[in-house]
Amino acid sequence: MSKISSRLRVVMVTGVLTVISGCSSIEPVQPWEKGILSRPEMTFNTDSLDTAFTEHVYFSKEAASGGAGVGGGGCGCN
């Protein structure tokens, strides 16, 4: 092995260990913090009328109800 590949391996291992150790300090959300996360402005679909319209258009095109993220044909075959 050459010096360059040995040094590169040490740098890579050090970098991976640094990233992994940074992930160990992540804590779960505490019960008193959940109120902040459940506010309406924290949702992805803030406009319920627009969401309902988009789902209606999807339903009309696909002839299926619900499951917008699920694959399958409009004929009911999966």
Image: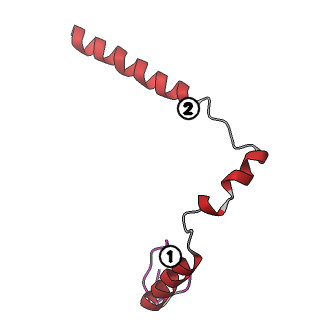
| SS assignment at label 1 | loop
Q: Which mark is residue 68?
A: 1
Q: Position of residue 34 (x, y in %)?
A: 72, 51
Which segment did they paint magenta? 65-78
Nearer to us in this view, 10 or 41:
41
Mark 1 or 2, nearer chain start? 2
Q: Residue at x 46, y 84 (%)?
A: 58
Q: Which mark is residue 41?
A: none
Placement of the N terminus among the 4 image quadrants: top left
Q: Position of residue 74 (x, y in %)?
A: 44, 87
Q: Position of residue 53 (x, y in %)?
A: 51, 84
Against 33, residue 27 (above or below) is: above
Q: Position of residue 30 (x, y in %)?
A: 75, 43
| SS assignment at label 2 | helix
C-alpha distance separating marks 1 and 2: 33 Å
Tag 1: residue type? Ala
Tag 2: residue type? Cys
- Residue 73 is covered by the magenta coloring: yes
Tell me where residue 7 sits by quadrant.
top left
Tell me where residue 49 sits by quadrant.
bottom right
Q: Which residue is mark 2?
A: 23
Q: Residue at x 78, y 47 (%)?
A: 31
Q: Residue at x 46, y 87 (%)?
A: 57
